Image (spheres, rainbow, N blue to C red):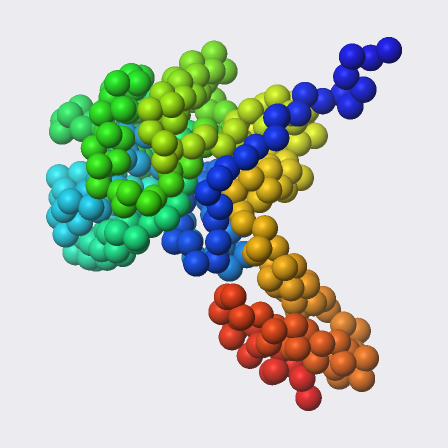
């Protein structure tokens, strides 16, 4: 008789007292997992901002950017701007944030910081996904960078963050967040191979210990075990993409189901089911769009869309009306 007939080691059921609603203001920031969870919430029409600074991996860069958005969002550290192949970038942000000249980049950064500042004043849920404890310090400016932008490695020194550094930065940020804000930490399940698997394990363990300390210390800080679900419950390469590093869509769906059940209020489910039905219907490609059966189908989708009051679906209604004869 097998001790575990399911051939898996499931995570214990998750329970979060505070739940996300359609009226919640959400900011998701950090590594690729923050992007993935954020996009799922966005698709379900929740009020969310995703990675305003682009994908960020290390805790200090995440906390520093948010701290500056609170305290000095109109200031840009111009000494950290570089020009690479006629494109201007900033070491504190992802390469997605770039400009054709320095002024354009500065204006873009100021705009991002202003909008992030406004969101942070009223944020209900701050989702932070940590990717790595390894950081790079710019040798000339002696500052940690969020992204090296393919600048020659000789300009940087690699360091391993200490938990005390992370705690100090987060403590500064937490004093500025609204008291009602819930901070949801996750550790990215995506392995970082730059330093090999041994150092990847070291890096992730430091992040996990940090999240343990934070969630133990503060009542408004919580941990969602995406890392453990991926590595322990889904420990099979069929749950990875072809690069054998990133979670497959099946794995993403599975982790999302945990997140949905644990963190999203059940009263949103009915509306989300309607949204899902409408979106799937619009994505359906009929053989004859003008046929009577398909026109009746579109009218049904229109009626469903018009019955949705909890979120703005004017764009869906307009699209359906344009398809109806």
Instruction: Please say whether residue 148 is visible from this viewpoint.
Output: no
Residue found 53% across the figure and 31% down from its top: 226
Residue farthest to the right, as pictured: 1
x and y percent of residue 35 in the render? Answer: 46, 44
**Residue 271 sits above or below residue 129 on the image:** below
Residue 86 in the figure: left or right of residue 252: left
Instruction: Please say whether residue 20 is visible from this viewpoint.
Output: yes
Which quarter shows the N terminus? top right
Viewer-nearest residue: 112 or 272: 272
Residue farthest to the bottom, as pictured: 325
Residue 242 in the figure: left or right of residue 123: right
x and y percent of residue 9 in the render? Answer: 68, 21
Residue found 61% across the figure and 73% down from its top: 307
> Quarter of the image holding residue 148?
top left
**Residue 208 sits above or below residue 257 on the image:** above
x and y percent of residue 116 in the render? Answer: 28, 51
Residue found 72% across the figure and 22% down from its top: 8
x and y percent of residue 24 in the render? Answer: 42, 54
Viewer-nearest residue: 226 or 99: 226
**Residue 119 sits above or below residue 65 on the image:** below
Residue 130 in the figure: left or right of residue 226: left
């Amino acid at each position: 008789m097998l001790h575990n007939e399911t051939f898996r080691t499931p995570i214990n059921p998750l329970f979060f007292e505070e739940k996300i609603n359609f009226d919640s203001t959400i900011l998701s920031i950090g590594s690729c997992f923050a992007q993935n969870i954020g996009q799922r919430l966005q698709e379900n029409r929740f009020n969310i901002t995703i990675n305003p600074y682009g994908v960020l991996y290390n805790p200090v860069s995440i906390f520093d950017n948010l701290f500056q958005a609170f305290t000095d969002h109109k200031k840009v550290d111009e000494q950290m701007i570089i020009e690479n192949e006629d494109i201007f970038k900033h070491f504190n942000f992802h390469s997605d944030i770039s400009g054709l000249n320095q002024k354009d980049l500065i204006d873009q950064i100021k705009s991002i910081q202003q909008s992030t500042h406004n969101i942070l004043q009223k944020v209900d849920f701050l989702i932070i996904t940590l990717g790595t404890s390894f950081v790079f310090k710019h040798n000339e400016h002696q500052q940690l960078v969020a992204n090296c932008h393919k600048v020659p490695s000789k300009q940087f020194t690699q360091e391993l963050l200490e938990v005390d550094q992370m705690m100090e930065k987060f403590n500064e940020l937490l004093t500025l967040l609204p008291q009602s804000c819930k901070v949801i930490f996750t550790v990215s399940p995506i392995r970082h191979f730059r330093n090999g698997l041994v150092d990847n394990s070291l890096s992730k363990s430091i992040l996990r210990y940090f999240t343990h300390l934070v969630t133990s210390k503060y009542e408004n800080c919580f941990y969602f075990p995406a890392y453990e679900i991926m590595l322990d419950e889904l420990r099979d390469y069929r749950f990875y993409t072809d690069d054998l590093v990133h979670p497959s869509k099946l794995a993403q769906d599975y982790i999302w189901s945990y997140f949905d059940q644990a963190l999203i209020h059940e009263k949103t489910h009915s509306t989300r089911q309607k949204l899902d039905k409408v979106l799937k219907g619009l994505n359906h490609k009929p053989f004859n769009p003008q046929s009577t059966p398909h026109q009746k189908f579109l009218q049904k989708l229109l009626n469903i869309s018009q019955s949705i009051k909890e979120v703005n679906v004017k764009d869906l209604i307009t699209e359906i009306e344009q398809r109806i004869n």
